[in-house]
Image (tube, rainbow, N blue to C red):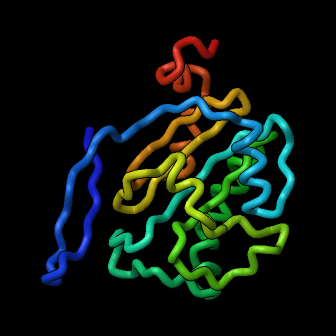
Amino acid sequence: NLFRWDYITEEGRREAKLFSPVYKIYVLDYPLFRQRLEKSTNRSFPLDQIFILEYTFLNDLCSINSSNRWSAQKIKERKKITNVYKENIEKTPNRVVLKFFEEGILLGNSEHSQEEYYYLDKGNFLRNLLFPQPTLCGSMAIIKPNGQAIIRNGEYSTQSMADHLTPENWELFFPDAK
């Protein structure tokens, strides 16, 4: 399977490149990772927190409405959609959905609110660690407390990503995870 990244050339043409793989797996230093997310979000997370991350790249040409400026109004409108699946996923204990934006994107939200879940990836920590290749319509990740992480590149629903947490799906990526 392949994923793509669209960009505008110096001549002003839209071009696309194909990359693989769509999925990547990692084993991370979870305590350090959790600590960095706590610092980035100014929130505390339990030791057994499962993170479901959405990531938006700078200059993403996902739709005609794509922009590197996310005003408070644009975020409010987007959250009308994202709040529904976020609440559904977070009904399961110790799951949290967070949305990060690559540095350079301007966010018009109040990231100091305890209700906020849209954050700037300051210093591009997540970009460098988990999302090295930009993808059209973003990427997603799940990170479990044992450090196992699945990255999914390209457009995908957050609910479908969360479905990877079922044991039968997770074991496809980590067969020894039983």
Q: How many marks?
A: 0
Identify the residue at image location x=61%, y=16%.
Answer: 177
Quarter occupied by the C terminus:
top right
Q: Can you give x and y, in whole percent of width and height, for residue 17 in the image? A: 20, 57
Q: Residue furthest front?
A: 123
Residue 77 relative to residue 68: left or right: right
- Please tell me whether residue 128 is drawn above or below residue 28 in the rendered image: below
Residue 9 relative to residue 4: left or right: left
Examine the image and state in which quarter residue 27 appears: top right
- Please tell me whether residue 85 is drawn above or below residue 23 in the rendered image: below
Examine the image and state in which quarter residue 94 appears: top right
Q: Can you give x and y, in whole percent of width and height, for residue 18 in the image? A: 21, 51
Identify the residue at image location x=40%, y=62%.
Answer: 137
Q: Can you give x and y, in whole percent of width and height, for residue 76 in the image? A: 64, 80
Q: Can you give x and y, in whole percent of width and height, for residue 71 in the image? A: 58, 87
Quarter occupied by the N terminus:
top left
